[in-house]
Image (spheres, rainbow, N blue to C red):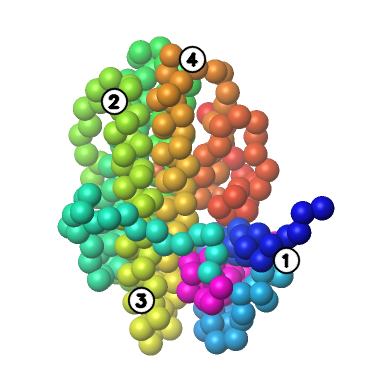
Amino acid sequence: MAELTRRDMLKGAAVAGAAAAVAGLAGCAAGAEKASSASAAASADAAASASAEAAASAAPAAAAADAVAEFKMVLGAEAGGSNFGIYRESADLHGDASETDDTLANLNSAMGGETGAHTKYAAFAEAAKAAGLDRIAALFNATSKAEDLHRHEEERVAQLLDPAAKLPEKPQVSPTETDGNLIAGARGEIYETAEMYPIYIATAIKERDAESDAAKKDALDQAVLAFTRAKLAEAYHAKWYMDAYTTIDTPTDEKYWLCTTCGFIHKGAKPGACPICGLTEYEEF
Ligand SMILES: [Fe+2]
Ligand SMILES: [Fe+2]
């Protein structure tokens, strides 16, 4: 039997940490503020003492109170690291226009990006359907709904920092041919997962760690989790857009499954626990 390496164990813990963290976030969204503040307290506590090995041995069903501490390890903030880092692509490719040191501004910017993507993909779905590409229309519809989840979660967190924060108007969209729409979608997803969200995550961690007000610190913590969850989901969106592009002339009738908690998408048989949030609620497309 192959020996389980330390890196394997850390990877397992990273997934468990992400699962518990998002479970905590979902609880918070439902109004379970008590669980949320317990997470924040556990975070401060564990930051000082938890080693990577201790986190690695945590059960997948770790209590939400441990979630943030484990998630910090996922983000590479604790010694030991993991297979998940805040990767950032060279800024030369896209410029630094989106970079700010202000998480509220970043939440508003992300709400704009997600609203644009949500609207654009719905239009792309219509165009694909009109072209007889039903499975690609299903993928665009699933992804459009994923971005809707992201923009509403970001609005919820933004309102913790500024009660007046609200989603922007939906833009006008002009779809082109479906192959081009898939490439445009994949490019946007890769930008978000490799550059935009990594900047926002790093900024939110920095602000959170420097914040002394408990409520604001908790809100910034929720921003870190919302950005991270979106960053991970966008990578799957890019994957399925490129898969659809490469098989545009040889489609199958496989289903897409959207995790209605975090926006993760899977193609094929109905998946078990979501690899991002650990939950099992899916919508079929
Ligand atoms: Fe996406
Ligand atoms: Fe999920």
What amino acid is labelled 2 in the image? Gly
Q: Which residues are magenta?
A: 59-80
Q: Cα distance, mark 1 to mark 3?
A: 28 Å
Name the residue beneath numbered marker 3: 206
Number of the label disc, if any, that sits on residue 250: 4
Q: Cα distance, mark 1 to mark 2?
A: 44 Å
* 45 horizontally vs 142: left or right: right
Name the residue beneath numbered marker 1: 59
Q: What percent of the width, then of the height, locates residue 208?
A: 39, 77
Q: Cα distance, mark 3 to mark 4?
A: 47 Å
Q: Who's the residue at 34% across and 77% down the image?
A: 207
In this rendering, the answer to whether 159 lies above or below 40 is above
Name the residue beneath numbered marker 2: 180
| Crowd class of label 4 (few under 14; some 14 to 19; many from 20; radius 10 Å) | few
What amino acid is labelled 4 in the image? Thr
Q: Who's the residue at 20% across and 34% down the image?
A: 172
State whether label 4 is within 8 Å of ligand 1.
no
Q: Nearer the N terminus, badge 4 or badge 2?
A: 2
Q: Nearer the viewer, mark 1 or mark 4?
A: 4
Q: Nearer the N terminus, badge 1 or badge 2?
A: 1
State whether label 3 is within 8 Å of ligand 1.
no
Determine the image quadrant of residue 55. Answer: bottom right
In this rendering, the answer to whether 210 lies above or below 156 is below
What amino acid is labelled 1 in the image? Ala
